[in-house]
Image (cartoon, rainbow, N blue to C red):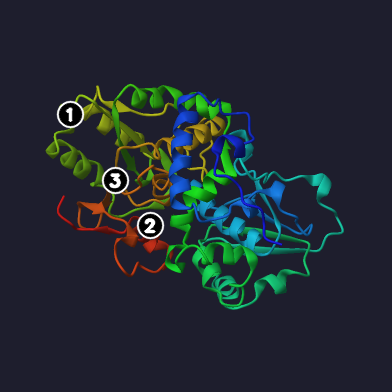
Amino acid sequence: MPLPSVKWNWGNLSHGKSVPLESNFGRRTRMRWLRLQDNYQSINISPLLITSHNFTGKKLIYKCKTFCGGLGDRFRGIITCFMLALASDRQFMIDMTHPLDVKNYLLPNMYNWTTNNKILNSTDTRKTIHAIDNNPNLQNEIRNTNFIETWSKYDIIDMYTNIDYVSDIFQNSLIQKNKIMKIFLDNLPIERLTLHNLFPLFFEVLFQPTLEIVNALEPILQIIENGYTLTCIHLRMGKNPSNPFDALFQNRATAVDDILDYLNRTKLRRKRNTRMFVASDSEQALSSMFAQFQNQTISVSGPILHVDRPTNAVNVVHGFLKVIVEFYLLGECDASILTASGFSALANRRRIDPYHNLFKYDDLNRRIERCHDVYEYEKSPKPGSVPLYCRIVFNCSSRAI
């Protein structure tokens, strides 16, 4: 029996009560949902909603109890696990408590992913999979074997991952006739069945912000409602005094100066209807931006936090809130200039038009690249290693700007 269709109506589908429907955030979310309706109107989203699907009782749980990457890494792992759960007819859950419980800031939206210890039986058979940063064996299993059948003997799959396996799932010919796979494969070209293309849909299905996040977003969203355009800058600097435990990025030292030079050449300061939102993992980088654009620059107050590597001096509660607010704001920009980062790459996918005025800083050549839609050409780039991830998401070029 075919699954019943579901009307693409955000107001009916969103069952959470944390977001006031008439808030600036609520209005902009409805606009975003209309874009998703246009992009995925051929997809029957019934299987993505837990209330309309009869699960076997088996579960797949995304786990993050210790080091599992920054927020971009985590969203990458969550979407991979969600797709694996759908494909294997398992209830999907999120158990992310490092460095604190994600439910402090993000709640279920159309799919209830909260863990419930009452329905987890101590006698359940479990399989634990670790795939942080790299796991070639798991990639091969997902891409080339009938993992649905292999995993069927386990009641619960606990998965720790920050890797994008979405394309691998759809490329697996052994499971392409699976009913969930067919819903997507019958309606979208396989080259579009990627994490970066499906992320805006899956993110809205899974998440809505708490009222505390919405309240923090409202003043900046009101600026947009008042007729100002928002130019967003994300400066991912890596190891620095504000973020001492992070990886060292050798070629980022000149990023702030190069981006400031570009902004001055484009005469941004003369555009009175423009405000500039800046997010960064470096207090020094933020200060440089404020010094140049004092009356136009907006930032989110709070301590700088890398969610996977917090320092003892940082207030984790306020720092995590700041990170989530910044992620949402990076999806509300009229123009974006981004350093390579999974965090801002995925946040950018939530924009109403993700490639409109999208630029990426090329730290190897110290230039600003214009980004374009990966489906603009007949053959899109194939997913590769993690270092190439951002280039694939952005698909940037050295076109004249």
User: Is mark 2 in CB contact (under 8 Å) with mark 1?
Assistant: no
Q: Which mark is residue 356?
A: 3
Is residue 245 among what the camera can see? no
Q: Is residue 129 above or below residue 209?
A: below
Please state which of residues 347 and 11 is positioned toward the viewer in this rendering. 11
Counting other residues with Cα less than 10 Å from the Cα at mark 2, is it few (<14), some (14-19), or many (20 or more)? many
Can you identify the residue that label 1 sits on?
269
Mark 2 belongs to which amino acid?
Answer: Val
Residue at the spot 33% in from the left edge and 21% down from the top edge: 226
Expressed as whole percent of the image width and height from the top left, the position of residue 165 reads 53, 64
Q: Which mark is residue 393?
A: 2
Counting other residues with Cα less than 10 Å from the Cα at mark 3, is it few (<14), some (14-19), or many (20 or more)? some
Q: Quadrant of the N terminus?
A: bottom right
Quarter of image, res 297: top left
Is residue 400 among what the camera can see? yes
Q: Is residue 113 above or below residue 138?
A: above
Please state which of residues 45 and 255 is positioned toward the viewer in this rendering. 45
Expressed as whole percent of the image width and height from the top left, the position of residue 236 reads 36, 45
